[in-house]
Structures are given as C-alpha cells and as structure tokens.
Image (cartoon, grey):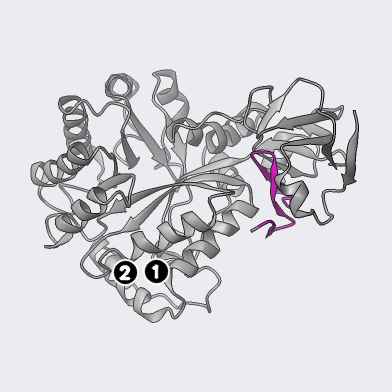
Amino acid sequence: MQADSTVSPTAGLSRRSMSAGATVFKNVRPYGAKLPVDLTVVDGVITADPAPRGAEVVDCEGSIALPTLVDAHIHPDKTAWGEPWVTRNPAGSIAEYTAEDVKLYHALRTPLKVRAERLMGHAVTQGTRAMRAHVDVAPAYDLVGVEGVGSARRALRHALDVEIVAFPQHGVIRTPGTEELLEEAARTGAVDRVGGIDPIGFDEALDEQLDVVFGIADRHGVGVDMHLHERAATGLESLRAIIDRTRALSLQGKVTVSHVFCVPGLPERELDRLAADLADAGISLTTVAPSADLVLPIGRLREHGVHVGLGSDGVRDSWSPFGNADMLHRSHLLAQVQGARLDEELEAAFRSGADGGARLLGLPVADLAPGSPADFLLVRGECLPQVVVDLPRREMVVRGGRVVARDGELVGH
C-alpha cells in the first residue's frame, strides 16, 4: 500500500484529504477489540479490498472506533444552547410550557437558524450522524422554525442527515391556524413529516386531530410522528386510533409515535398483543429514557419487530435546563434508567442509540464491517461497556469516510 501522507487523529487535515475518495484509518480498535486493525474506506464505504494507490492515511493510534449514533427525537428550534443563562419560570401543564416557549423565543436575541445550527453542529462533534428534528409550527411562530432548521440542515449536509417534523406543540385543533401551517409545510416540501400531540388529553379532539394530521400526510406523501404523553387507558385509546388510521391509509412504515407513556408498565400479555399490532402496522416508537417508569420496554418491543429509536428531546429550552445533544450520553442515561449492570446490557443501550435510530430513519446500520457506511467516532478506552459508562472525549468523528469533527470542533465546515 502506498499513501501520500500519515495524519494523527489530533492533527489538522487538509481540504484535499477531507475530500479524498480513499482513506485508510490505521490502528483502529473496532468496538474495543484487543488488536488494532486498519479500516479502508473507498467512496464513503468500508471495504475489505486493499487500499488503492495514493489513499490518504490517518493513524488512529489505537483508539476505539464505534458507529456514530442517531438522535431519533430532538427539538433544535427551541434551544438556548450557547446563549446566556436562561432563568425558567414555573410551569406544569403543556399549555403553560408552550407559553414559556413563546416568551423564550422572543427573549433570545440570536436568530433561530443560528441557534439550531450551533446545536446541530455540536451534536455532530459528539458523534451524531443523523437526527429527526421536531420543529414547532404554530401561529405564534408561523414557519420560522421550519425555515431555520432547514437552513441548518443545508449548512450541515456534509456531516448530518436531518429529517424535519412539523410539530404542532400548541395543538392542532385548539389553536386555529395551525392546520393551515401544517398543510403549507407539507405541501411545499419543507418537512419530511407532520406531527400531532396528545389528541385526547391536550387537543380534546381525537378523531378531528388525527383526521387532520393523517389527511395531510396522505395528501402530500409525508410521514407522521406523533407526540403521545397520555398514559393508561387514554393513551392506549389514542394509540389504537393511530394504528387504525395507519392501516386504513396504507401508511405502514411511515408512522412513528414518540414517548408513548401508556406502554411502559403494561402487563406482558397486553404488551405482546399491542407490540404485534404495532409491528403489523409498521409503526415505530421513540423514547428519550426520561425515567425508569416511563422508558419503553425496548427489548420486548424489538422481539416483535417494532423499531425503537432513542432521542435527546429538548436541549436547554424553556422546558428544562438540561440536555446536551450527545447521543452517547443519552445511551448512558438509557442504561442507567434500565438498571443496566452487565456488559451486554450496556452494549444494548449503545445499540439503541446507534442501530435503533438508523433503522427508524431508514438508514443503513453502520457496523464497521465491509459494505458499511464509514460513519464512526474515535474515543480512548478499554471496551464498549466502559465507554458507555465513562463517556470519554470524542477525538474524531468520521462521516462517509471524511473527518467532520475533531476534539469537539467541526472541521471542513
């Protein structure tokens, strides 16, 4: 093998090396393997073939390589990430939180598109390769959020895949004008999905809300991603109605339900029946691992063929001062709330953040094997379970064989 140059993972990379079609990442330990190997990448894909003549070489110095992760549920339009500290006001209901959202939107001086790009870029530096971004659509904002996150998506397209959901946080029916904005966002192709929220508990209009949301999706060929915080029988009624509409409109594979707080705690037999129906309708679910009693039973759902993704949710917005858009950290939190102790349990939490989200977004799973997309991050550590627990610094992030971030900073941007 011949190479033009050898580059350490902490050294600067030229624009030529960033755009090269072939790169060899030397001395890599996939998933923490004891012996390092070389990963050869040609045109963004890992190959078992010998490196072509003139391939660039990056010496990874024995770092662990792990697949980059997918944030299946995040709200980048709301964020105050990178802004001066925000003092939050008391709030308890969804209506009160949405009122605080509007106050914060007007109080922040940095344009929404700048804040969104800042947060989304930070997510890349921590090892996120794709995300589904829920963006508030309401008369209070018009389509500013959709436009701003769309701008950030274009700016980061070399490093990050982004799906945009037009999310009616203020309600579809209870807030006049929202339906028209959802329709416009879908009709113009500005979004990939339309959403809804708690059709019984918040909108108090189960059939009317679902008719609007699913009707827009059907007319314009977009997907659906519903926020469902409703619990117990109320949540199950809404979820069953979502399953029915998905089947009736042949939207199998295009519908996701997020949070789904009515599922945790179900008796096993009822959970199995529901999971079988979800799988048959091609409906996927997402969780943000908020607590032990609200995290989805991911393993049991997957046994039935239900795709389950993991997400960040809000990041330093009016709802919460917490969040960091770091999906490795979110995998750590998932492991904690699940009570993970064994190595295989810690590894499964990581897989939820990596493979689960990839399947949910229809992306190829990045497994570091020949034929896999060359999407991986490099960290120092012993093994994958230890990395999930200790959360080491991301030394490098690679997307399609190109180094897109190093030591917490974007490169080639």
Judged from the image, the secondary structure of the residue bearing numbered disc 1 is loop
Part of the protein shown in magenta = 391-412
Q: In this view, does 137 lie to the left or right of 398?
A: left
Position of residue 42 relative to residue 182, above or below, is: above
- State the residue at coordinates (35%, 57%): 135
Position of residue 255 relative to residue 278, above or below, is: below
Q: What residue type is labelled 1?
A: Ser
Instruction: First in sequence, mark 1 or 2: give its number.
Output: 2
Judged from the image, the secondary structure of the residue bearing numbered disc 2 is loop
Residue 106 in percent (x, y) is at 35, 79
- State the residue at coordinates (81%, 57%): 12
Residue 1 in percent (x, y) is at 90, 28
- State the residue at coordinates (54%, 64%): 118
Pick whichever, 353 or 94, lies toward us.
353
Residue 45 within the segment the image draws in magenta: no
Task: Read off the residue under disc 1.
Answer: 318
The picture quadrant where one finds residue 347 is top right
**Foreground disc of the pair 1, 2:** 1
Task: Read off the residue under disc 2.
Answer: 91
